[in-house]
Amino acid sequence: MITETHAPAAPAATLSGTGFAAGTEVMTMTGPVPVEALKVGDRLITRDGMRPVRAIRLRILRGVRPCRISQNALGNARPERDITVAPDQPILLRDWRARALYGQGTAMVAASRLVDGVYISRAAAPVDLEVHVLDLGTDQVIYADGLEFGVSAL
């Protein structure tokens, strides 16, 4: 179950298990910034250039098993350090994993689909995870902790 806090209820279509845990460093025009320190108007680096943050929603994902991605699990400095993300958070793959899993050069994959139990794992028991959901006005790929993540317009 997902509970939204500090923001009006979002349309049902946007309520999914995505978002970034506190401490995730998002690449902005001025360098990496922890997601919890971002403000509306900050400019993020995306694959399509700079985009301003239009909204930030704080959500509590109830009873989820977050994904922990170990440093270097997806390549050299990918991620740059151990990180925790929501299980449905899309990650852009542009390597052999995309070809092996989807037969394509690139693929947007939910973090939970990458779990191998060693380098990418899920919490042993369900927890309530507070996440920050970023709205850039359109679907974008952002850079955080050395990985490329999908964010959707809210």
Image (tube, rainbow, N blue to C red):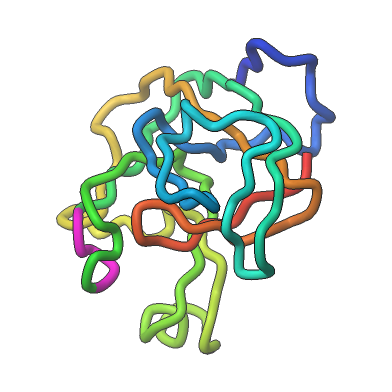
Residue 137 shown in magenta? no
Quarter of the image that includes the C terminus: top right
Seen in the picture, residue 86 relative to 103 is either above or below; the reply is above
User: Which residue is pictured at 46% across the width and 73% down the height?
Assistant: 93
User: Which residue is pictured at 22% across the width and 72% down the height?
Assistant: 76
Q: Point out residue 33 in the picture as x, y percentages from the top left corner.
A: 43, 40
User: Which residue is pictured at 48% across the width and 49% down the height?
Assistant: 30
User: Which residue is pictured at 45% across the width and 43% down the height?
Assistant: 87
Q: Is residue 41 left or right of residue 145?
A: right
Residue sticking out furthest to the front: 30
Quarter of the image that includes the N terminus: top right
Viewer-side residue, 36 vs 5? 36
What range is drawn magenta here?
Answer: 71-75
Q: Is residue 122 left or right of residue 150?
A: left
Residue 73 shown in magenta? yes
Q: Main secondary structure of the magenta part?
A: loop
Seen in the picture, residue 39 relative to 27 is either above or below; the reply is above
Residue 17 falls in which quadrant of the image? Answer: top right
Residue sticking out furthest to the top: 6
Q: Point out residue 39 in the picture as x, y percentages from the top left corner.
A: 61, 29
Residue sticking out furthest to the right: 11
Seen in the picture, residue 16 relative to 5 is either above or below; the reply is below
Q: Point out residue 50 in the picture as x, y percentages from the top left corner.
A: 66, 59
Viewer-side residue, 129 vs 49? 49
Q: Point out residue 116 in the picture as x, y percentages from the top left corner.
A: 25, 59
Residue sticking out furthest to the left: 118
